[in-house]
Amino acid sequence: DMNVKELREELRALGVNTADCIEKQDFIAKLAASREASKQRADSAPGANAVPFADSNPLFSFASQLQSAVNQVGDSFQSMANSITGRFDSLDQRLDSIEGQRRRLQDKLGAPSSTPLGRLNQLKA
């Protein structure tokens, strides 16, 4: 069984964009689809025993390298977006906590004091 890193590397080698893959199952599904598409192309290609076009064409090699670079940028962008989302979630939790503290303090200050000393302290504040 392959881990996510291995799946991502194989997909990159095949020139498949993985920027939209989040879960391991996403990578597995893309790899299975890519392998099936490659198999269908190979089975239906005329002269299937001939030298593959990719091996004989330097432009295809360049395009493959370019696609790999684009995939790496996409993966980096996805990682950065996930990090930013995590930070926003953390800040949102902190704001919720502060808002809860503010409400509790407001309730304490707004509640009538049950002792004369308590009322005097509220008046001082």
Image (cartoon, helix red, strand yellow):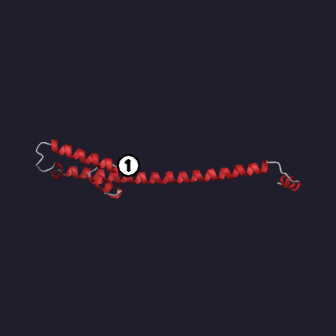
The front one of 79 and 64 is 79
Q: Is residue 16 visible to us here?
A: no
Query: Which residue is at a point 24% across and 48% down the rendered structure image?
Result: 35
The number of numbered discs placed on residues in the rendered structure image is 1
Dot 1 alpha-carbon crowd within 10 angstroms: few under 14, some 14 to 19, many 20 or more: some
Relative to residue 56, is residue 90 drawn left or right? Answer: right
Return the x and y of residue 72 as percentages of the image width and height.
35, 54
The front one of 39 and 123 is 39
Q: Residue furthest right?
A: 116
Relative to residue 74, is residue 124 drawn left or right? Answer: right
User: Residue at label 1?
Assistant: 21
The front one of 24 and 5 is 24
Image quarter in which the N terminus is found: bottom left
The front one of 124 and 106 is 106
Dot 1: element: loop
Query: Which residue is at a point 32% across and 50% down the rendered structure image?
Result: 28
Return the x and y of residue 71 as percentages of the image width and height.
34, 51
Return the x and y of residue 2 as percentages of the image width and height.
31, 57
Query: Which residue is at a point 83% across and 53% down the rendered structure image?
Result: 122
Return the x and y of residue 16 as percentages of the image width and height.
30, 49
Q: Is residue 42 visible to us here?
A: yes
Name the amino acid type tagged 1. Cys
Image quarter in which the C terminus is found: bottom right
Relative to residue 111, is residue 7 drawn left or right? Answer: left
Q: Residue 44 occupies which quadrant of the picture?
A: top left
